[in-house]
Image (tube, rainbow, N blue to C red):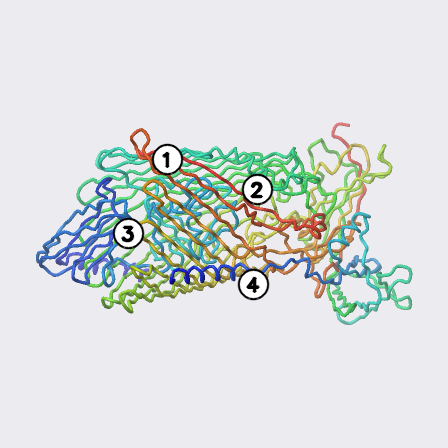
């Protein structure tokens, strides 16, 4: 009898324990969050801020299927920018593009300058979101020799020097083939080199791998962005696998998205094979 | 520094005085009567008194007693009790050699009433070779899997041999073979034991608060003692299984013994098992399936050079090969790439030479030199399927090499000449060096780093019997290193008190330092199965850990044994290899320093009878980590942490020939980070990406884990030799436990109709034949 009681107790405990290991499907806990998307470019006029909401997986697939990226846009938000905590700029929703917020027509346009701290505050859907960015220094590319022609062989990388006050900048590079080249008239082949601060620790040199240049004797446009901390962290943390995801570093309080700034420089080069 | 040297010499002078003291006593060795193997932790006591001890790791014992005639009782689990008359003469030490006869009936050891004079350990479990066989397994007898049936020891998943003890990271467990450390023995898929169990004689697991003679790690200890070998005749065994073969041979040699054991797998067959890991529709038939095998080798010789000097030389070497590994195999076939190929091999090797001598019956000194090495090579090509920036070059070719080398000289001295004290001291001089090279798309050109560090460490410990019923252990350790700017102190205090003959309370606290760290690359998915070892340096300070343990145990011949322990620990200096990318400035930009804490309570009930053994263990534990890295600044649950764990192990002798082994696990699911929603974002230069809305780190738990394993062993004679035929069934009711949840956006959408989990092992039967000679 004692033995029976003991086994009953053990079985009951195991049953209790099994159901005590509570499992919750995270999908059922989905609550939409505000998503901000806004960029400031050094020495350029401020364009706009886009406000969205996250969607559940099912809706997302539908939008991806139709290759839409702007979905679930949020209207009627109150969004403002403050520059160095002294100048305040209020944004208004663009009448022809819902979810996009621009500087009010009666206000002066805003041109970002390096070193400025710009703070964004947003209230919408009973949620509050804020973010801030510091406009990075302007950058210039060294003149390439002669007439921006680059001579490489089939294994060389292309090296470009960046001039900047900062010796340790974060950059993002885009290389575009000339749109009018050969049979690929309608196809813009572009490669992106993710921002890698470590290339610039000793000198401001960008090394673009050889496989970014598919053909010789054509022009390539090389665009280099000097990123602020927000964009730098965002870019570098995007390369995360889905199985055990690492959070993307966004620097946005109260929501998701990215509010960052950059300075831009670009150059058009013609890549030629050594010996030609 | 001068003061420390001065004090050390004063200590030596005092020791010398002590050593010359002459006392009455009894010393000797306890051996197995058939193989002449020394028996570790056998109970030795004088009948009718509270005077007694247990044998040490060499089978030696020493008892101090007044002159007179006594009856000495020696007992050990699985052996017949021995009773011998003995006379202790004034100012003399009587020498004895006691041989115990093994018995097929499992007899419990008769224990001395009161405490022994060999230090008792809190949080420690002592296992004999036969204990490892109790747990049924899919492959060969598995030490790691056996350990995970004990409360407080858990595993990350079925495909990994890494074990987590009381919330510590795997690198915080010190593995020791015959006194020498092994860097990190592990094999893939969790089916194989980290060591060849044929070679193992005893294992002592100290889950927390270990004695200070164990150097270099901040958490637990797995102390393995290999067979010394048969001193009488050639013995051994050959084992054939579906997936591996192993053999062990021991024989008398010169002035002692010699033993070898070897193991080789033919795990290439696992391809077919892996095929069933995922649903048929998700498998790309063109994917490269992995080929995996390993071999390992143990060697040990013990030579009794004269009555007082014993020489032990032992070695261990293992090498694993993994070819054509495609980490994308588990994902959707539509985006899988047949071209992805990775290969890896890693090896552990260790050898040591130990000289042990008795200066007098109370004083034992040993000198041990060891050299241990770990290296891993990993290389391959991967399609970067999950890079969220479109247009990044499709393929990444990389190679990776890491080597860690540790060597040292241990000088240890034990002294039992003082009444009610057992003194231990040690001087350790060790050198650790490492080399790391990495090349690849996300790694700056030719990232190469090397470094080394030398440590000098002194430890002193005393086990003090305050009374027959109360024992206090105190110890401290000081460590110097050329790259650490100040000496590092560690300490340990443990007490044990018998409230009644059956009921004991115990507790302890300690502070420990760790001089080797293992980190695993995060976010670079093809490197996640690679472990990187680096020694502590000035910019990578040692991990420090503080332990607190308290509990009680209750023993009764009719009721069984119940052991209850609560614990808490806190560590600082934990290392995280930053997710996302690896930079050229080695330490400062690649690693984040963090901290962690754990707490829990454990229950272990054991019942041991002549024809069956039953054990149930339960533990509740929580472990947290945080790092100085964005998003990880606040404490979050460690990925390996399963809050509730319950393990049942039963070993039933069905008849003279048949034995049934069973084990059943039930535990909470592991925590994980979930994507619950997403949004589209357009980055500068018109790059469209999908941004996932993630939960907090490890905020959710996977479904509970449970599994039943059953093994049936038949004992019989084959060619007039003892043999065993084994049938083991892993995961009997084929419960496909969950290792993780897919977060791919396409699969997320499918979750509305079916959960997308990555599953672990299905039912896996295996057979094996073991022949002894």
Mark earlier in primary sequence (2, 1): 2
Disc number lying in front (1 or 3): 1
Counting residues from the start of the chain, the first of labels 1 and 4 encountered is 4
The residue identified by callout 1 is B770
- Is label 2 or label 1 in front? 1
> Viewer-proximal residue, B376 or A45?
B376
Q: Which residue is mark 4?
A: B635
Check disc 3 and report its element: helix, strand or loop.
Answer: strand
Q: Disc 3 marks which residue?
A: B412
Gap between marks 4 and 3, in whole Å?
40 Å
Q: Quadrant of the N terminus of chain B?
A: bottom left
Q: Chain of mark 2?
A: B
Asked if the residues shown at circle 4 and circle 3 are in contact, with their CB atoms under 8 angstroms apart, the answer is no
Q: Secondary structure at mark 1?
A: strand
Q: Residues within 10 Å of mark 2 (few under 14, many from 20)?
A: many
Give percent across and percent down for residue B525: 61, 46
* Same-subunit check for callouts 1 and 4: yes
Give the SS element for disc 4.
loop
Compare marks 4 and 3 and give the one earlier in the sequence: 3
Say which residue label 2 marks.
B438
Between disc 1 and disc 3, whose residue precedes?
Answer: 3
Q: Is residue B148 left or right of residue B463?
A: right
The residues tagged by marks 3 and 2 sit, at their Cα atoms, a distance apart of 40 Å
In the rendered view, tell whether residue B613 sits above or below residue B191. below
């Amino acid at each position: 009898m004692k033995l029976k009681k003991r086994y009953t107790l053990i079985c009951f405990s195991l049953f209790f324990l099994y159901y005590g290991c509570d499992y919750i499907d995270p999908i059922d806990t989905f609550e939409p969050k505000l998503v901000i998307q806004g960029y400031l470019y050094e020495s350029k006029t401020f364009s706009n801020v886009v406000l969205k909401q996250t969607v559940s997986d099912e809706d997302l697939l539908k939008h991806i299927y139709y290759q839409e990226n702007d979905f679930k846009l949020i209207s009627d938000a109150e969004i403002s920018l403050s520059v160095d905590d002294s100048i305040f700029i209020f944004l208004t929703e663009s009448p022809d593009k819902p979810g996009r917020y621009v500087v009010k027509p009666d206000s002066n346009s805003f041109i970002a300058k390096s070193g400025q701290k710009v703070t964004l505050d947003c209230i919408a859907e009973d949620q509050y979101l804020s973010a801030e960015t510091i406009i990075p220094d302007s950058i210039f590319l060294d003149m390439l020799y002669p007439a921006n022609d680059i001579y490489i062989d089939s294994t060389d990388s292309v090296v470009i020097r960046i001039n900047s006050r900062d010796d340790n900048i974060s950059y993002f590079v885009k290389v575009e083939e000339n749109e009018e080249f050969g049979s690929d008239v309608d196809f813009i082949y572009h490669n992106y080199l993710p921002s890698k601060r470590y290339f610039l620790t000793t000198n401001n040199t960008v090394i673009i791998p050889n496989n970014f240049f598919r053909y010789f004797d054509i022009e390539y446009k090389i665009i280099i962005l000097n990123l602020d901390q927000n964009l730098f962290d965002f870019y570098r943390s995007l390369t995360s696998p889905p199985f055990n995801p690492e959070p993307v570093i966004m620097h946005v309080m109260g929501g998701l998205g990215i509010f960052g700034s950059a300075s831009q420089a670009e150059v058009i080069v013609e890549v030629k094979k050594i010996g030609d | 520094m001068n003061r420390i040297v001065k004090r050390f010499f004063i200590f030596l002078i005092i020791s010398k005085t002590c050593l010359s003291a002459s006392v009455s006593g009894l010393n000797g060795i306890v051996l197995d009567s058939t193989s002449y193997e020394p028996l570790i932790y056998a109970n030795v006591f004088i009948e009718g008194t509270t005077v007694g001890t247990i044998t040490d790791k060499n089978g030696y014992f020493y008892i101090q007693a007044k002159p007179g005639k006594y009856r000495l009782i020696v007992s050990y689990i699985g052996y017949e009790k021995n009773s011998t008359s003995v006379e202790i003469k004034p100012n003399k030490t009587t020498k004895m050699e006691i041989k115990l006869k093994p018995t097929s009936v499992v007899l419990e050891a008769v224990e001395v009433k009161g405490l022994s004079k060999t230090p008792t350990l809190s949080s420690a479990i002592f296992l004999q070779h036969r204990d490892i066989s109790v747990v049924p397994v899919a492959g060969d007898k598995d030490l790691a899997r056996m350990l995970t049936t004990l409360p407080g020891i858990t595993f990350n998943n079925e495909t990994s041999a890494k074990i987590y003890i009381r919330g510590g990271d795997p690198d915080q467990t010190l593995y020791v073979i015959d006194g020498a450390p092994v860097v990190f023995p592990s094999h893939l898929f969790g089916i194989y034991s980290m060591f060849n169990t044929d070679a193992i004689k005893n294992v002592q697991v100290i889950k927390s608060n270990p004695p200070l003679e164990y150097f270099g790690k901040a958490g637990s200890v797995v102390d393995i003692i290999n067979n010394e070998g048969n001193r009488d005749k050639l013995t051994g065994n050959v084992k054939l299984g579906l997936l591996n073969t192993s053999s062990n041979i021991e024989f008398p040699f010169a002035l002692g013994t010699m033993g070898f054991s070897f193991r080789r797998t033919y795990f290439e067959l696992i391809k077919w098992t892996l095929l069933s890991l995922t649903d048929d529709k998700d498998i790309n038939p063109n994917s490269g399936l992995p080929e995996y095998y390993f071999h390992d080798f143990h060697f040990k010789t013990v030579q009794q050079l004269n009555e007082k000097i014993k020489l032990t030389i032992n070695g261990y070497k293992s090498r694993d090969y993994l070819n054509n590994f495609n980490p994308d195999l588990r994902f959707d076939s539509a985006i899988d790439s047949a071209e992805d190929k990775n290969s890896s091999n890693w090896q552990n090797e260790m050898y040591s030479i130990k000289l042990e001598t008795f200066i007098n019956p109370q004083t034992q000194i040993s000198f041990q030199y060891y050299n241990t090495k770990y290296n891993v090579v990993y290389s391959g090509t991967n399609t970067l399927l999950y890079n969220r920036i479109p247009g990044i070059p499709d393929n990444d070719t990389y190679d990776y090499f890491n080597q860690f080398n540790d060597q040292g000289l241990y000088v240890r001295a034990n002294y039992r000449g003082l009444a009610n004290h057992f003194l231990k001291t040690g001087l350790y001089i060790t050198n650790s060096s490492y080399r790391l090279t990495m090349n690849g798309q996300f790694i700056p050109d030719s990232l190469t780093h090397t470094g080394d560090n030398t440590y000098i460490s002194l430890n002193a410990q005393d086990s003090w019997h305050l009374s027959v019923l109360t024992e206090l252990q105190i110890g401290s350790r000081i460590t110097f290193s050329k790259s650490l700017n100040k000496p590092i102190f560690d300490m340990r205090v443990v007490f044990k008190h018998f409230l009644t003959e059956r009921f004991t309370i115990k507790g302890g606290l300690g502070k420990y330092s760790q001089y080797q760290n293992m980190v695993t690359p995060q976010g670079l998915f093809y490197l996640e199965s690679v472990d990187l070892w680096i020694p502590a340096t000035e910019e990578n300070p040692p991990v420090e850990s503080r332990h607190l343990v308290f509990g009680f145990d209750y023993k009764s011949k009719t009721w069984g044994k119940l052991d209850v322990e609560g614990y808490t620990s806190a560590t600082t200096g934990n290392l995280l290899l930053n997710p996302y990318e690896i930079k050229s400035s080695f330490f400062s930009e690649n690693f984040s320093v963090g901290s962690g804490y754990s707490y829990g309570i454990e229950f272990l009930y054991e019942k041991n009878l002549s024809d069956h053994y039953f054990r149930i263990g339960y533990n509740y534990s929580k472990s947290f980590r945080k790092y100085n890295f964005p998003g990880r600044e606040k404490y979050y649950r460690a990925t390996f942490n399963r809050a509730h764990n319950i393990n049942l192990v039963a070993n039933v002798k069905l008849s003279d020939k048949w034995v049934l082994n069973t084990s059943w696990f039930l535990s909470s699911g592991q925590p994980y980070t979930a994507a619950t929603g997403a949004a589209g974002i357009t980055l500068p230069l018109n790059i469209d990406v999908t941004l996932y809305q993630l939960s907090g780190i490890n905020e959710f738990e996977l479904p509970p884990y449970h599994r039943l394993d059953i093994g049936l062993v038949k004992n019989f004679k084959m060619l007039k030799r003892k043999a065993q035929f084994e049938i083991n069934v892993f995961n009997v009711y084929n419960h496909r436990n969950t290792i993780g949840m897919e977060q791919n956006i396409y699969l997320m959408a499918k979750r509305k109709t079916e959960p997308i989990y990555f599953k672990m092992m299905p039912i896996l039967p295996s057979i094996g034949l073991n022949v002894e000679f």
